[in-house]
Image: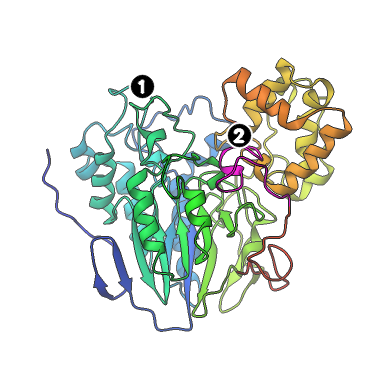
């Protein structure tokens, strides 16, 4: 066993008080400005770049991951005026970094590895950095002890290189920020019969810790890697709040939940009693970052939310020179947005689809959860119900992997309502088709009325209302380009 010093490499703001699980950072302005970014997937110098099983867009983006993180940090974030008070990274810093680590010593001290590359880039940030850990920051193979890396290795690697714990809290400007860990429950335990690393889980201890931190009543933003629809439901049976969704829903001081992992921008449209967003990945576009303004009165805004074009793999370039608005310098180099681009989606026509094999090889939409695209892709289901071709489409297009075409889309209220209507028009039953296909393909398909897409503490399909009750302005965006609490 290595004896490691608890090295804190962060250039932190003045720490006024600290304890084991909560740090207090001084803030004197009328609001606290956070810079949000996620999913860089820095590749290891020794990594096999074949990327078997990945699509072309994924492979192209991961080869440029370190350049994109550099451009985000050095060209974009460090030029923002006024500068953010804090930067928050949403997980998956290094792409399968533990898998290519030959030993703990190599991961900590060399030879040159992806964590050192990432640290060298993030050291250029001119603001303090906080982060959560993502699925690629662990290495778990269900049922296989020898292919799995102990959680303690991830803990030591991130403490050594970045000075963070697996989960922790920060108090700043009257707000509490919770940085949770999506990989500490049973779905990330190689020994557990329900191990499934496509799903997040938090473990009873972390859930209890989170409940204690929420009890103080401070306005709170909660950060974690996996979006809530991919979080295991009822993971702590018998507990007052048996999973993260029910715990957060029970506390009115939860003002916003922020995740990464799905690689595109998602607004979960009132699926929960609190707003929940998913960040697009900087591995595809160095413009994929957002500002979060936390006000002293317990409200917040995301002034550049509209740069992501309604939820896409890529974002527009915006200005941050004292004003926040469209018109900034585009990211250096070509972006990996996919085909069709967001502004082409409405007019893009696919050839007749008999199965996923009928899709053009380059088809990988930029825009998140496009109903127009999904109706074309789901043609086998609309035509014939739960046939083998339909179920292949469901499993490979709507399953839990972040790289799939429509991951999580069946959880979005507006998307579900539109596609359910299309199925009814075709005399098909969408929930029954999903259930049958999930069973026959042994694939998790997140959808309304199932798991974390259900209303907390029930198994009923929640209301299909699209307007989140906790927001102002009649919808997810106000006329001032803000996502407002």
Q: Quadrant of residue 287?
A: bottom right
Q: Which mark is residue 169?
A: none
Name the side, left or right, on which 356 lies relative to 324: right
Name the side, left or right, on which 261 lies relative to 42: right
Q: Quadrant of residue 175?
A: bottom left
Q: Is residue 12 visible?
A: no
Q: Which mark is residue 143?
A: 1
Reply above or below: 321 against 181.
below
Reply above or below: 402 against 455.
above
Q: Position of residue 39 (x, y in %)?
A: 47, 48
Q: Residue at x 43, y 50 (%)?
A: 240
**10 Å neighbourhood of mark 2: few (<14), some, or many (≥20)?**
some
Q: Which residue is mark 2?
A: 404
Q: Which residue is more in the foreground, 479 or 125? A: 479
Mark 1 vs mark 2, foreground winner is 1
Residue 461 on the magenta segment: yes
Magenta stretch: dominant SS?
loop
Q: Residue at x 79, y 38 (%)?
A: 420
**10 Å neighbourhood of mark 1: few (<14), some, or many (≥20)?**
some
Q: Are marks 1 and 2 in contact (CB under 8 Å)?
A: no
Q: Position of residue 106 (x, y in %)?
A: 21, 38
Q: Position of residue 357 (x, y in %)?
A: 70, 20
Q: Which range of residues does the magenta coloring cover?
A: 445-464
Name the side, left or right, on which 346 lies relative to 304: right
Q: Which residue, as the protein is rendered here, is positioned at the far top?
A: 388
Element under disc 1 = loop
Quarter holding the N terminus is top left
């Amino acid at each position: 066993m290595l004896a490691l010093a608890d090295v804190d490499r962060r250039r932190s703001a003045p720490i006024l008080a600290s304890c084991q699980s909560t740090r207090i950072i001084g803030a004197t302005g009328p609001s606290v400005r956070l810079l949000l970014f996620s999913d860089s997937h820095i590749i290891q110098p020794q990594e096999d770049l074949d990327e078997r099983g990945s699509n072309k867009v994924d492979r192209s983006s991961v080869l440029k991951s370190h350049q994109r993180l550099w451009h985000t940090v050095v060209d974009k974030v460090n030029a923002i005026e006024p500068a953010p008070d804090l930067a928050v990274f949403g997980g998956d810093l290094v792409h399968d970094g533990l898998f290519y680590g030959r030993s703990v010593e190599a991961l900590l001290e060399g030879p040159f590895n992806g964590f050192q590359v990432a640290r060298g880039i993030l050291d250029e940030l001119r603001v303090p950095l906080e982060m959560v850990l993502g699925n690629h920051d662990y290495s778990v193979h269900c049922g296989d002890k020898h292919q799995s890396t102990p959680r303690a290795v991830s803990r030591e690697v991130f403490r050594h290189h970045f000075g963070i714990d697996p989960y922790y809290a920060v108090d700043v400007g009257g707000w509490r920020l919770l940085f949770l860990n999506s990989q500490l429950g049973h779905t990330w335990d190689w020994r557990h019969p329900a191990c499934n690393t496509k799903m997040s889980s938090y473990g009873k201890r972390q859930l209890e810790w989170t409940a204690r931190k929420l009890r103080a009543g401070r306005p709170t933003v909660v950060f974690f890697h996996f979006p809530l629809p991919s979080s295991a439901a009822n993971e702590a049976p018998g507990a007052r709040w048996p999973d993260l969704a029910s715990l957060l829903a029970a506390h009115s001081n939860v003002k916003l939940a922020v995740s990464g992992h799905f690689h595109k921008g998602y607004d979960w449209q009132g699926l929960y009693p609190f707003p929940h967003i998913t960040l697009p990945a900087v591995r595809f576009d160095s413009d994929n970052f957002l500002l979060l303004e936390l006000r002293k009165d317990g409200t917040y805004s995301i002034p550049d939310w509209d740069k992501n074009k309604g939820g896409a793999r890529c974002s527009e370039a915006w200005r941050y020179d004292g004003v926040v608005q469209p018109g900034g310098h585009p990211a250096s180099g070509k972006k990996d947005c996919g085909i069709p681009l967001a502004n082409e989606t409405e007019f893009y026509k696919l050839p007749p689809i008999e199965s996923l094999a009928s899709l053009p090889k380059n088809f990988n939409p930029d825009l998140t959860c496009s109903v127009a695209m999904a109706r074309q892709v789901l043609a086998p289901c609309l035509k014939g119900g739960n046939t083998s071709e339909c179920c292949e489409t469901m499993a490979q297009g709507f399953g839990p992997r972040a790289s799939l075409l429509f991951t999580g889309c069946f959880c979005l209220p507006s998307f579900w309502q539109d596609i359910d209507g299309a199925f009814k028009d075709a005399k098909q039953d969408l929930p029954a088709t999903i259930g049958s296909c999930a069973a026959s393909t042994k694939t998790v398909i997140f959808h309304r009325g199932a798991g974390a897409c259900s209303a907390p503490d029930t198994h009923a399909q929640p209301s299909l209302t699209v307007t989140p009750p906790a927001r102002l302005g009649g919808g997810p965006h106000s006329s001032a380009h803000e996502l407002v609490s």
